[in-house]
Amino acid sequence: PDHRQIRNSADNSPLQIFVKAKKKINDIFGEIEDYVKDSVHYMQDLQKEPNILDKDAVTKTEEYVRKVHGIRDVLARDHMKVAFFGRTSNGKSTVINAMLRDKILPSGIGHTTNCFLQVEGSPNDEAYLVLEGTTDHCAVESVGQLAHALCKEKLSESQLVKVYWPKNRCLLLRDDVVFVDSPGVDVTPNLDEWIDLHCLDADVFVLVANAESTLMVTEKNFFHKVSTRLSKPNIFILNNRWDASANEPEFLDQVRRQHQERAIDFLVKELKVCTAKEAEERIFFISAKEALLARIAEQGNTSPSMALAEGFQNRYFEFQDFERKFEECISKSAVKTKFEQHSQRGKFITNELREALDAIYNDAQKLRDDKLLQRKELHNKVNYTEQQLMVITQEMKQKIHNIVEDVEQRVSKALNE
Ligand code: GDP
């Protein structure tokens, strides 16, 4: 597919709900940050004048700068996370590889995933892995190297290895989807620890089941535990290895119906995580191996290296259908769980800031009114004094006049006498 086609399909992808929301909320927080900084500068200027601002209001606003900055940091790292679980060899790594359109994770015999593997987009378009608790980057160019690097380390099954893969090689990674592959649920007694360490922030869980057998108690148990810790987790069930059914076409419909009914019962009646109608959109019959082969062939513009079993097209369509429903679900869920909190905080901060500025405005208004009143009182006093002075002066004048007249009279009287 040429570049334009890839870009078009990327822009139509439901993942864009998350990508666009992330950009928007980032922009909004950028504006909030400017607004908070402006307010701080304004307050610091005001503080130079005595009696206008109390110190606490300024300190409080300065703290918002740090808070908003913190939120922007978290936002930049926010992503959509999908975690894959199931029994060993059901095909978890193969499903992830098919979605990533490349053999990134080692799969198959001898490559049992014995730790948690997280695949995410590399910030610098280089491929490397980082072991949990270290900062060393170990460069990897191929699956072979990755498998080798993983075998070399003594890893415990709850440990996490982060695989950073170039974003330009995969749209899902570019759009901030993070994949987590787990050791088989059949091999561990540490399910609780797994859930605490790796599952609580997952937006979507994918149970990779084996269509050649029924859901196992261990698989069910794990999801029972998950649903006690998280309210209504988003769970998809992939009945993988559905290509095996091509060998027995006469039982195909019957087997499918049976798996479907059990899976619906599991989600609806046992876990109570969704309605029967929703469950229909969460259960798929696929062949990850075929999907991976087809995708690798598509990219190399060749035909698959292996003959594909009867019914391949239908299974491949169903795989693509799964991907679309998955993308819709994960991006909506991530927007809700991740951005709802941020927007509440953003609202809280802007409200607090508005109240602080309103308070300054009101105080300033009050100060002005007080001064006006003082001035008026002073004015009145001056007026009164002036009037008094006038009265007094008038009286004095009169008195002096009288005295002068009196003296004149006396003098002229004296002169006459
Ligand atoms: P994991 O342990 O769950 O990660 O399983 P893997 O992805 O490593 O797969 C185990 C083996 O099953 C590998 O040899 C895969 O090639 C094979 N496999 C995976 N998916 C399918 C499938 O859909 N059909 C068939 N026939 N084989 C598959």
Image: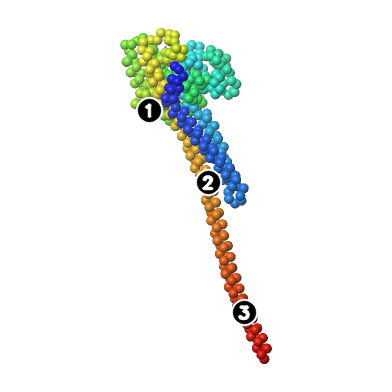
Quarter of the picture containing the N terminus is: top left
Above or below, 130 against 362 in this view is above
- Residue at 35 percent of width and 28 percent of height: 275
Q: Residues within 10 Å of mark 1 (few under 14, many from 20)?
A: some
Label 3 to label 1, Cα distance in Å?
109 Å
Check disc 3 and give the amino acid type: His
- Residue at 43 percent of width and 10 percent of height: 303
Label 2 to label 3, Cα distance in Å?
65 Å
Check disc 2 and give the amino acid type: Leu
Picture coordinates of residue 182, whole percent (x, y)? 49, 20
Check disc 1 and give the amino acid type: Cys
Please give the residue where the numbered disc 2 appears in the rendered image.
357
Q: Is residue 218 visible?
A: no
- Residue at 48 percent of width and 25 percent of height: 175
Please give the residue where the numbered disc 3 appears in the rendered image.
401
Sequence-earlier tag: 3 or 1: 1
Q: Nearer the viewer, residue 204 or 355?
A: 355
Disc 3 C-beta below 8 A from ligand 1:
no
Label 1 to label 2, Cα distance in Å?
47 Å
Picture coordinates of residue 64, whole percent (x, y)? 55, 39
Sequence-earlier tag: 2 or 3: 2
Picture coordinates of residue 21, whole percent (x, y)? 46, 31
**Identity of the residue furthest to the bottom in this view:** 417
